[in-house]
């Protein structure tokens, strides 16, 4: 039997492993990070944000073999959907601009990133969640879910699981989640995940567009 005809087991395997790795990384590196060991902070970030990609590849190899892996990697190939590739960059940027403007109008805005720190910040954002998470959550999980339920329900399920997957960050020293309301964070991330599901489908199952959205957001 083809593994794609029985998506429940690879779905559970992927989600459970992602959650397990993230919580283990939190527990394993937390003490060192609390003692201001920067290696532990970066180890936690890199392990967690890149684990969805490697877990997706491993899960696909186990259940789908090398042909499944090739199919998964083809999701990195852009398709001709230019209006949606433009939208996936402009809409997150616009939403962030409006949110920041409103926050600053009510004296709630965080300090602006220093100009000299902008380059490293962009590099870090591009090299972490924007690239490390999409092949797993959108490239693998969303299509598996869509084999059983509608695209909208699949997007909501995927986005909710993705948002809750970030929970260990609230317990890890030095993470920005310490300054964010957990409910606000989960609602915002889940809503963004639904948007990423839309972008994924409108760009014909390609994760390049969702990577762009994730980076801009």
Image (cartoon, rainbow, N blue to C red):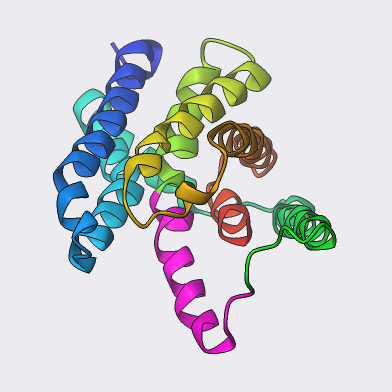
Q: Residue at x 56, y 60 (%)?
A: 215
Q: Is residue 63 visible?
A: yes
Residue 9's place in the image compared with 178, above or below, is above
**In what quadrant of the picture does the N terminus appear?**
top left
The image quadrant that residue 197 belongs to is top right
Percent of width and height locating residue 19:
30, 30
* Placement of 109 over or under 138, stated as above or below: below
Left or right: 167 as drawn, with respect to 30: right
Residue drawn at x 26%, y 52% is: 44
> What number of labels is visible?
0
Describe residue 164's horizontal placement relative to residue 105 as left or right: left
Q: 42 and 70: which one is in front?
A: 42
Relative image position of residue 5 (x, y in whole percent) = 39, 12
Answer whether residue 204 is visible to the viewer in this image: no
- Which quadrant holds the C terminus? bottom right
In percent of width and height, residue 124 lies at 42, 69
- Within the magenta stretch, is there residue 94? no
- Residue lying farthest to the front in this orientation: 107
Q: Quadrant of residue 141?
A: top left
212 lies left or right of 103? left
Image position, residue 62 (x, y; %): 19, 27
Query: Which segment did they paint magenta?
Result: 112-132
- 45 up-or-down from 202: above or below: below
Of residues 14 and 168, the one nearer the viewer is 168
120 falls in the magenta region: yes
Residue depicted at x 64% and y 21%: 151
Q: Main SS type for the magenta part?
A: helix
């Amino acid at each position: 039997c083809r593994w794609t005809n029985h998506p429940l087991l690879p779905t559970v395997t992927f989600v459970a492993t992602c959650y397990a790795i993230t919580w283990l990384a939190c527990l394993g590196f937390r003490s060192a990070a609390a003692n201001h060991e920067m290696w532990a902070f970066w180890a936690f970030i890199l392990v967690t944000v890149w684990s969805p990609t490697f877990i997706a590849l491993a899960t696909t190899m186990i259940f789908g073999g090398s042909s499944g892996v090739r199919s998964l990697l083809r999701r990195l190939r852009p398709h001709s959907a230019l209006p949606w590739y433009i939208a996936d960059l402009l809409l997150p940027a616009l939403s962030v601009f409006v949110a920041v403007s409103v926050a600053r109008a009510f004296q709630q805005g965080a300090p602006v990133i220093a100009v000299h720190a902008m380059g490293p910040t962009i590099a870090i954002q591009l090299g972490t969640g924007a690239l490390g998470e999409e092949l797993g959550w959108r490239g693998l999980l969303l299509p598996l879910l869509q084999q059983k339920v509608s695209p909208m329900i699949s997007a909501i399920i995927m986005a909710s699981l993705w948002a809750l997957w970030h929970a260990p960050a609230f317990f890890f020293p030095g993470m920005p989640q310490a300054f964010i309301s957990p409910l606000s964070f989960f609602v915002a991330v889940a809503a963004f995940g639904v948007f990423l599901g839309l972008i994924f489908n409108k760009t014909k199952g390609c994760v390049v567009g969702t990577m762009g959205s994730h980076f801009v957001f």
